[in-house]
Every structure is written in structure tokens, then in C-alpha cells.
Image (spheres, rainbow, N blue to C red):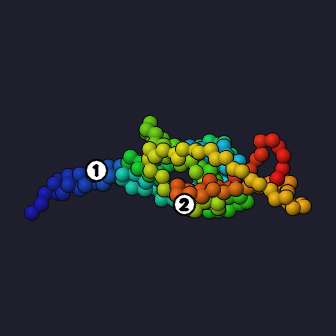
Amino acid sequence: MRSGILDDITFFNYLSLSIDSIWRVKDRENIDYKVAVYTGEEAGAGTDARVKVNLVGEEGESGWVELDRKGVNDFERGSVDKFELKLKPLGKLTKLIVTHDGSGFGSAWFLEKIAVECKGETSVFHWGQWIGEDSDSKEVTIKEGSEALKMVEYSVVVTTGSVPNAGTDANVFIQINGQSGSSGTKLLDKKDGKRF
């Protein structure tokens, strides 16, 4: 036969452990992540598309989180957009996946890098390329500590035909594709200011 006091102590210990577990779970849900998104300086680098990230760490992933500050025009050329996210603890970040929905005019986006700070530690994810519309994919995976591709300067020679009305005053664009990716659409801007 059991003693009533022993049953009370067992129940109290169980209740104490359960409450402690609840507090630990609650604490796990309240981790602050500060995300800084750097858009490149290239012509047309910004986007009005809806941008989402999925942070992946050694202890799990965040799932898709939309980066949007209400009333702010995010992801403009040369901007650094900062977001504060409350996510479950993910452990040391290993990679992130970033995507956009392709909406808006000229939705291609030149993402320079994304920096994520949590508990005083910062992980940097370099990209340095176009995402979407004019490139191969609207979703990319970037590993932590990756280096951006080095920018290469190309000299492009355009020869306009000699038939009457062969020239143009319109803007002329080029896209260069290679094994490492795409340049995205670039305006051919003549240094002498003359048109084609």
C-alpha cells in the first residue's frame, strides 16, 4: 500500500519537471535573429518581388520566412535592409536558402550578401550574383562562409551595320552566360556617350 505523502511528492516532482520543460520550450521559441540583406550596386539590381529566406542550422531550419518591412521599399539598389526575426534555435548556421516570387517589373535581383546575427555571432552568406528572371533560378542555396564570385570586367565591341537606318537611339542590353552563372541583363553604356 502506498503512502499519500509519497504520492504527493511524486506528483509534485512530475509537475515541477513538466513546468520546467514548458519554460525551456518557451525559451527555445524566443531566439532573436538579426538579418541584414545587401543588394548590389549594379544597374537594375533592386527588386520589388517578395523575398523569402530559410535559415538552416545544425539543429534545424526556420522554414520560409518572408522579409518585408511594411511601408518600406525593401531591396533597392545599393541598400542594406535589416530585419529582426524571432525563430526557434537553429544552432550554428550552415546555409541559407533565398528565393523570390518573380513579381513586379524587372524582378531580377542582384543579391550581394546576407549577414545573420544571433547571440553575438554573425554568419555571412556571400552571393554576388543575380537571382531570378534573367538568371537560371529564383531560388539559391548559399553556404555559410562562402565567397562571392570575383567580378570580371569584359570589353564588348559592337559593330553597327552600314546600311541606312542601321543605328538606334534605344537602350541596348547584353547578357553573358557561362559555367559559373549569368551576368544578368546589363546596359551597354558607351563611354563616349554616342548611340549605336
Side of 157 where 124 appears, left or right? left
Residue 133, numbered label: none
- Residue 1 drawn at (x, y percent): 9, 63
Residue 153's place in the image compared with 14, above or below, is above
The residue at the point 38 percent across, 48 percent down is 91
Q: Can residue 189 be seen in this view?
A: yes
Q: Is mark 1 on a helix, strand or loop?
A: helix
x then y, percent, for residue 73 = 70, 49
Name the amino acid type tagged 1: Ser
Residue 141 percent location from the top left of the image: 48, 56
Name the residue beneath numbered marker 2. 139
Q: What residue type is labelled 2?
A: Glu
Q: Which residue is drawn at 59% across and 45% down?
A: 152
Residue 88 place in picture, x, y as percent? 43, 52
Q: Name the residue under label 1.
A: 16
Res. 74 visible in picture = no
The answer to whether the residue labelled 2 contacts the one labelled 1, judged by CB atoms less than 8 Å apart, is no
At horizontal 18% and vertical 57% (from top left) the residue drawn is 7
- Nearer the camera: disc 2 or disc 1: 2
User: Which residue is outermost to the front?
Assistant: 162
Q: Which residue lies furthest to the left in this view?
A: 1
